[in-house]
Image (tube, rainbow, N blue to C red):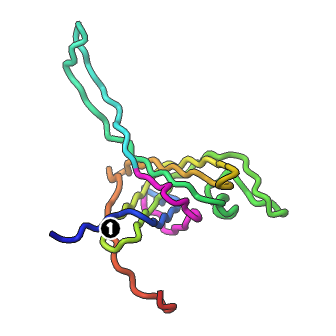
Amino acid sequence: MSKLIMSWSKVKLEIGKTGANDAMATELFEPGVIKDKSTTLSAEDGDTLEAKATGGVVVASESNEPVLTLETTVMEQDFAVREKFGGATVNQDGELVVSSNLVDDDYSFVLTPKNVGATGIKVRKASVSLKPAYSEEEGHSTVLTFKILQCEDNELYRKFKVAASAPSAQGD
């Protein structure tokens, strides 16, 4: 039996605005430092349609596609990164002026686990929810929630195996 390679532990999240015709973002950026153990990909059952005859007997049933959601928490997000989502600008005093926490554009993302051979996910189109948070224990954070949307060509996502990267010039 071959060794099981797990997709757990440290992850790298890269995001960018979805391109025309639901194309994968061409410019990806990291949203900041991800809080340990805060990244989850979950599925909710899709809506179920039922037809019932007299007496409540189900005579037909149909389920829609499950809703897939990626959620992560970014610690002490940089103002310039927050500005990329819209609804906020950095003023001349270096303050972040927030006018809205709604994100209008769709975003692509790539979630890559650290282990070579582990499974990552690429999503071309997702809606984004941005929720600021604060606690005395953890400081400021931003909870990012991505709901995966079906593309025009019906693609939801792609899974890939993490390849070994070539060593950099710095030897890491």
Identify the residue position indicated by label 1 in the image: 118
Q: Is 20 in front, or is 122?
A: 122
Any magenta on residue 30?
A: yes
Q: Residue 141: horizontal and vertical position, in percent?
A: 63, 54
Task: State the residue at coordinates (36%, 71%).
Answer: 115
* Disc 1 secondary structure class: loop
Task: State the residue at coordinates (37%, 50%).
Answer: 152
Q: Residue 56: horizontal and vertical position, in percent?
A: 25, 11
Tag 1: amino acid: Ala
In the visual, does 134 lie left or right of 61?
Answer: right
Task: State the residue at coordinates (35%, 63%).
Answer: 7
Task: State the residue at coordinates (51%, 62%).
Answer: 15
Residue closest to the far right:
93
Residue closest to the far left:
1
- Compared with 67, 39 (above or below) is below
Q: Residue 151: horizontal and vertical position, in percent?
A: 38, 51
In the rendered image, which quarter is residue 46 located in? top left
- Compared with 26, 97 (above or below) is above
Magenta segment, principal secondary structure? Answer: loop
Any magenta on residue 5?
A: no
- Compared with 164, 14 (above or below) is above
In the visual, does 111 lie left or right of 33?
Answer: left
Tally of numbered tags = 1
Q: Is 106 in front, or is 20?
A: 106
- Crowd band around label 1 with a 10 angstrom C-alpha radius: few (<14), some (14–19), many (20+): some
Quadrant housing the N terminus: bottom left
Residue closest to the far top:
55
Q: Which residues are magenta?
A: 23-41
